[in-house]
Amino acid sequence: MDPPTRLLFLPGASGNTEIWRPVAERLRHGAERIHQGWPGFGGERLDSRVQGFDDLLQLVLERLDRPTAVIAQSMGGVLALQAALAAPHRITHLVLAVTSGGLPMVEHGAEDWREAFAAAHPQLPDWFDASNVDLSDQLPALTIPTLLLWGDADPISPVEVGKRLASRLPDAHLVILSGGTHDLAMERAQEIAPLIDRHLST
């Protein structure tokens, strides 16, 4: 696999494209950076062509026209894994932070956040909380080098989820940051950037 010439950053359900910028600014890797937003989320204008998560996945796949490392947080991590399953030859590396990773979350003690989040963000598309993806059985087929970043103070995506992903993905390395929350990427950028640079060099 060629080294990445593009770094594609995916936000979570907030659609906040700023979440990864503190990390991106600290990375030494010379690849192009793209911060993907989600139409209808986080202030991004609605797009009539986007009517569900399959359409968001298509937006991600369209960015994979060159060797790309996908760096994703929370909901973006599910889309990153779906993209990797659909087009594994286009992705050189994965970095997944505090995501469900397409695992059933209840059995891992995760806080159910969707209803409260949707109530606090009434502009969200009405299909937002209808997705129920389970990638558990497909993950062992993914051999892309994967860095898993977790905080041990995140009730939305507990450390047990990261451990489960690490056990399902054949080439995964889990790093747990003490005191890290669901905003890990923004809060701990100084620690995370060197970890990603090291991962991208492998």
Image (cartoon, grey):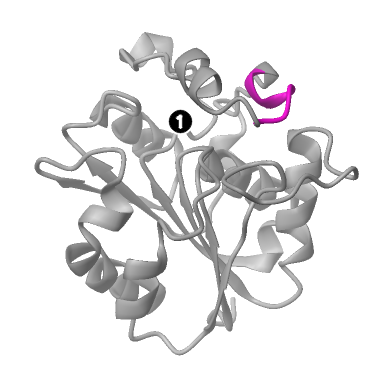
Assign a secondary structure to mark 1.
loop
Q: How many marks?
A: 1
Q: Main secondary structure of the magenta part?
A: loop
Q: Amino acid at mark 1?
A: Ser
Image spot of residue 3 (x, y percent): 53, 82
Report the front residue among 90 and 64: 64
Sort mark 1 into few (<14), some (14-19) or many (20+) by Cα contacts within 10 Å. many
Residue 47 x, y percent position in the rendering: 83, 47
* Residue numbers of the magenta segment: 124-129
Q: Which residue is mark 1?
A: 100
Query: Which residue is farthest right?
Result: 49
Q: Residue at x 89, y 43 (%)?
A: 48
Residue at x-position 79% and y-position 63%: 62
Magenta span has 115? Answer: no
Find residue 37 and report its horizontal and vertical position in percent.
Answer: 62, 55
Say which of 191 and 113 sits in front: 113
Horizontal and vertical percent position of residue 140: 53, 38
Q: Is residue 43 above or below residue 161?
A: below
Q: Quadrant of the C terminus?
A: bottom left
Q: Is residue 34 positioned above or below 38 on the image?
A: below
